[in-house]
Image: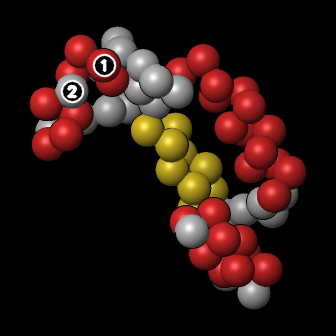
Amino acid sequence: QAFNGLKNLYDEGQRIELRVVVNKINHKDLLNIAKKFVEYFPKVYRVNWMAMEVLGSALVNKDKVWIN
């Protein structure tokens, strides 16, 4: 649903900023994520690769998601 919503906005010419929170689960797939961004959103306004803040669910699941 989120992807389809972003794709609809992108196709309508809206400025899209993509944010990826790097964590233990996705850190080995960052290149693949970037390739998908280029494939589906080649003229996206901005991509931010963000460090995790240990709050909420991240705090509860710190051992599963935290990466230095």
Q: Residues within 10 Å of mark 1 (few under 14, many from 20)?
A: few
Residue bearing the label numbered 2: 61
Residue 52: x and y in percent read 32, 32
Front-lying residue, 43 or 10: 10
Q: How packed is label 2: few (under 14 Cα within 10 Å), some, or many (20 or more)?
A: few
Residue reaching furthest to the front: 1
Residue 20: x percent and y percent? Answer: 51, 43
From the viewer's perspective, is 60 left or right of 51?
left
Residue shown at the point (72%, 38%) measured from the top left: 34
Residue 38 placed where, x, y %? 82, 48
Q: Are marks 1 and 2 in contact (CB under 8 Å)?
A: yes
Residue 48 shows in this picture: yes
Q: Give me the residue at 38% from left, 31% from top.
A: 51
Query: Residue flagged by tag 1: what amino acid is it?
Result: Lys
Instruction: Report the front residue among 61 and 42.
Output: 61
Say if 4 sits above or below 33 in the image.
Answer: below
Which of these two is toward me, 45 or 52?
52
Give the residue at mark 1. Answer: 64
Task: Give the total of numbered labels.
Answer: 2
Type of colouring: secondary structure
Q: Residue at x 80, y 39 (%)?
A: 35
Q: Position of residue 14 (x, y in %)?
A: 67, 81
Q: Is residue 27 left or right of residue 57?
A: right
Residue 28 against residue 40 in the figure, above or below: above
Q: Label 1, label 2: how many angstroms apart (C-alpha)?
A: 5 Å
Q: Nearer the viewer, residue 59 or 15?
A: 59
